[in-house]
Amino acid sequence: MEVSNESAIKKPKRLTSVVWNHFERVRKADICYAVCVHCNKRLSGSSNSGTTHLRNHLMRCLKRSNCDVSQLLAAKRRKKETTLSLPNVNYDEGQRKDEYIKPTVIKYDQEQRKDEVISLGSSRFDQERSQLDLARMIILHGYPLSMVEHVGFKIFVKNLQPLFEFLPNTSIELSCVEIYGKEKEKVYEMINRLQGRINLSIEMWSSPENTEYLCLTAHYIDEDWKLQKKILNFVTLDPSHTEDMLSEVIIKCLMEWDIECKLFAMTFDDCSIDDDIVLRIKDRISQNRPLLSNGQLFDVRSAAHVLNCIVQDAMEALREVTQKIRGSVRYVKSSQATHGKFNEISQQVGISSQKALVLDSPIHWNTTYFMLETALEYKSAFSLLQEHDPAYSSALTDAEWEWSSSITSYLKLFVEITNVFSGNKCMTANIYFPEICDVHIQLIEWCKSTNDFLSSIALKMKAKFDKYWSKCSLALAVAAILDPRFKMKLVEYYYSQIYGSTALDRIKEVSDGIKELFNAYSICSTLVDQGSALPGNSLPSTSSDSRDRLKGFDKFLHETSQTQSVASDLDKYLEEPVFPRNCDFNILNWWKVHRPRYPILAMMARDVLGTPMSTVAPELAFSIGGRVLDSHRSSLNPDTRQALICARDWLRGEPEEHNPSSALALYLEAS
């Protein structure tokens, strides 16, 4: 007999059995029915009938509904004394009864329909979505694509969801590329919506097979004044490419993202990169719009890289002495007897150091510094060791100990500064100027050494530094001026020590440079305030008539009426007292708060402070080797490699201040 005019019964109290999540209780006359929501079959719904027959139906209905509730029903039978409801599913049999885990509502992405929200015991199995979830997991965690063919993985998934259909890694690879394509569209739209400019860092990578890669990363400060970065491209360079072709590869990437008109600066990791490469990029970009400050701030080189280059000069000069110290430490640690004898000698000569001798890792120069520093504290013990132990043959002369002491003091400065660069979670450009100035001052002093060995090393180090300083000093100084704790005072303080009698001329060059940059931003101040244009872009006409003859007058009126007022903003900022220095100062928050007071300066500060003055990831800060991709990633085809690396960076989506490590760190070849 057909059931008609059915109406859902409002239950006076909650039905605690899990099976009622799969049945609807309806009534016709005085008879109650339980209607399966999956197959619409009607069963007895009377309270006297119990739920055993409903459970049995669900087990038979499982094949048709693809709704795996068998585990929930089994858990119900195992824990009769525990009420099981969807919000409280106990996954761990050893877990206490009162420690239930509340399942999290998960969405695959923002575009997923509301009715596709995953919740335990209520969704149908979706092979396509599960395949995309698997691909997403592989991207996020850097797992090899071949993991889908591993026996252990297959057993785990089959026990978890028997309906999952295993596919070859080529299919998962296509899913990864599909995710990359969707995420790329989002990043493209986000970047092109930015009101500020973009800074680009360019890093070179290699593989164990000596293949070279080019990594382009966009750095910017978003509308919430958070420092962000996104990897845009990871390009595999053709083995036959020459260095002069590098500019074409970079320009092609810029055009692919339509950001050639939004660039503020480009930071190259190699300080020795050919200047012609940068000139070609400048020429191509300037065809569309003039570069700010005539491009003086466009070409930036990595501060961490130049420090590494300088350190290598010092390490190479001390190479033979370092080998002797390394051999001495290795000999002392070669046996317990030798180590005990060395400790006795140390006590005899009155050495009270608590540091233990350590061997260095030659590919990490900070470990060499720690080895030298510790060995110097045991200098007297090493000098006497040869008298007590004829087998010890790595003793240093007094001159070699003196060289070691001087070079170690050099390295100490570089270790401290590199720690500042790698340890800061939000490396805005203003942080670099005082650190680099300290290096400059010390190099000048070291060059004055009366010891020919030390002065020759210092002169070689300073030659490399001077090349970097000539390119980046203005960018470093401008960023420091935009720090309200420093302003022009810090430039005056350091330049007087660096340049002496010519300091005033150098200070004026910096002052003129920031004023020129400010004037470039002030040209379109009204449009910047409205957030509708970027500095340097041509001003739109106030009329829609393409034959409006007064377009030029609009621009003239704007420039002449705005220049004086916005220029006074810069003067007011510089004339006001500096902000007190404190450890908790956040320069981005300061500019966010003071943006209404200094609208043009704030726009300029956002672009300048977002410039990456260093391109070295924290985990590579002290490495003397280059960036080497692991063998798994380097074996992939170029398109898949780029898709996996870029998509991982985008999916993680963490602000730079919360994610100091490079997104590529996972792909470094283990050393």
Image (cartoon, rainbow, N blue to C red):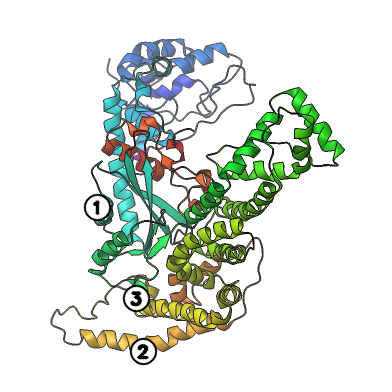
Q: Are marks 3 and 2 in contact (CB under 8 Å)?
A: no
Residue 376 or 306: which is nearer the viewer? 376
- Is 336 positioned to the left or the right of 220 in the image? right
123 drawn magenta: no
**Residue 623, how many percent across, how many down?**
51, 43
Residue 640 or 359: which is nearer the viewer? 359
111 drawn magenta: yes
Name the chief secondary structure element in magenta: loop
Work out whether 510 lies above or below 157: below
State which mark lies toward you, 1 or 3: 1
Task: Work out whether residue 260 can be spotted.
Answer: no
The mark nearer the N terminus, 2 or 1, is 1
Residue to which mark 1 is pinned: 245
Q: Residue at x 50, y 79 (%)?
A: 506
Q: Residue at x 35, y 31 (%)?
A: 135
**Secondary structure of the residue carrying numbered label 3:** helix
Q: Which mark is residue 561?
A: 2
Q: Residues within 10 Å of mark 1 (few under 14, many from 20)?
A: few
Q: Amino acid at mark 3?
A: Leu
The mark nearer the N terminus, 3 or 2, is 3
Q: What are the residue bounds of the magenta stretch?
A: 93-114
Q: Residues within 10 Å of mark 2 (few under 14, many from 20)?
A: few
**Secondary structure of the residue carrying numbered label 2:** helix
Q: CA distance from mark 2 to mark 1?
A: 46 Å
Q: Which mark is residue 260?
A: none
